[in-house]
Amino acid sequence: MKETSRIPIIRLKGNLVISIQVAMSDRMVQLLKDDVTQRIEQERPAGLAIDVSGIDIMDSYISRAIHDLCIVASLMGVPTAISGIDPMIALTLVEMGVSLEGVHTHRDLESALEFLDGQHPITDEDPLSLEISGGLETEEDELIRFLEEDTTDRDEIVVDETNQFQ
C-alpha cells in the first residue's frame, strides 16, 4: 500500500507556514491536522499561516477541515491566518454556505505573515505579566484583585478590544 505524502510545514520567523500546493485527499487532511497540532505542541510558534493558493478545488470537507485546524490552533494559543483563497473558490464557498467565520483571511502569504507579526508571540514566560512590588502578577490576578475591591462607586467594568480592563 502506498504511503500518503505529507504537506510540508516550515518554520519562518517564528511562525509555522503551510503552503498547500496539491489536491488534498481525506487522508492528507487528517495527516496535516495531526502534524500541525504536534508541531504546535513541540515548537510553540508565534503564529500559523496556511496558504491555499495552490488548491484548485476546495470542497466543503476540505474547507471545514482548514477552518477546524485554525480553531484548534487558536485554542492552543496560536493565532492563525489563511491566505490565497482564489476568487472562484471564495464564490463557491459562499454559494455552498461554507463560512470561515472566526478565521483571519488575507490576499497573499506576505499579508498573512505581516498580520501574524503583529500578534503577541508565545514565549515560555507569560507575555502579559505585570511587574509589581510584590513580584510578578498576571493580568488574571490583577483582574481578580480589581473585582474584589469595593466597586460601589463604579457603574460598570469596561474591557477594551485588547481585553484590557479600565
Image (cartoon, rainbow, N blue to C red):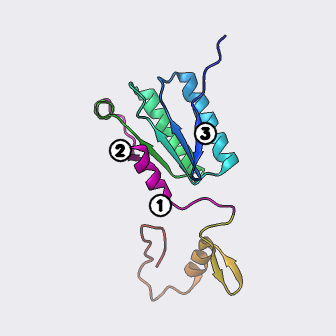
Marking on residue 118? 1
**Relative image position of residue 84 (x, y in whole percent):** 39, 39
- Three-letter code, disc 1: Gly
| Quarter of the view holding residue 160 | bottom left
Number of other residues with Cα within 10 Å of mark 3, as a class: few under 14, some 14 to 19, many 20 or more:
many
Q: With respect to residue 51, does 123 lie above or below?
A: below
Q: Which of the two labelled residues, at mark 3 and mark 1, occupies the earlier sequence position?
A: 3
| Quarter of the view holding residue 33 | top right
User: What residue span does the magenta drawing correspond to?
Assistant: 96-124
Q: Secondary structure at mark 3?
A: helix
Q: CA distance from mark 1 to mark 2?
A: 17 Å
**Relative image position of residue 104 (x, y in whole percent):** 41, 49
Number of other residues with Cα within 10 Å of mark 2, as a class: few under 14, some 14 to 19, many 20 or more:
some
Q: Is residue 63 left or right of residue 142?
A: left
Q: With respect to residue 152, does 104 lie above or below?
A: above
**Relative image position of residue 146 (x, y in whole percent):** 56, 81
Number of other residues with Cα within 10 Å of mark 1, as a class: few under 14, some 14 to 19, many 20 or more:
few
Q: Is residue 114 part of the magenta span, yes or no?
A: yes
For disc 2, the marked residue is 107
Pick the quarter of the image with the N terminus.
Answer: top right
Marking on residue 36? 3
Q: Secondary structure at mark 2?
A: loop
Count the marks.
3
Q: CA distance from mark 2 to mark 3?
A: 22 Å
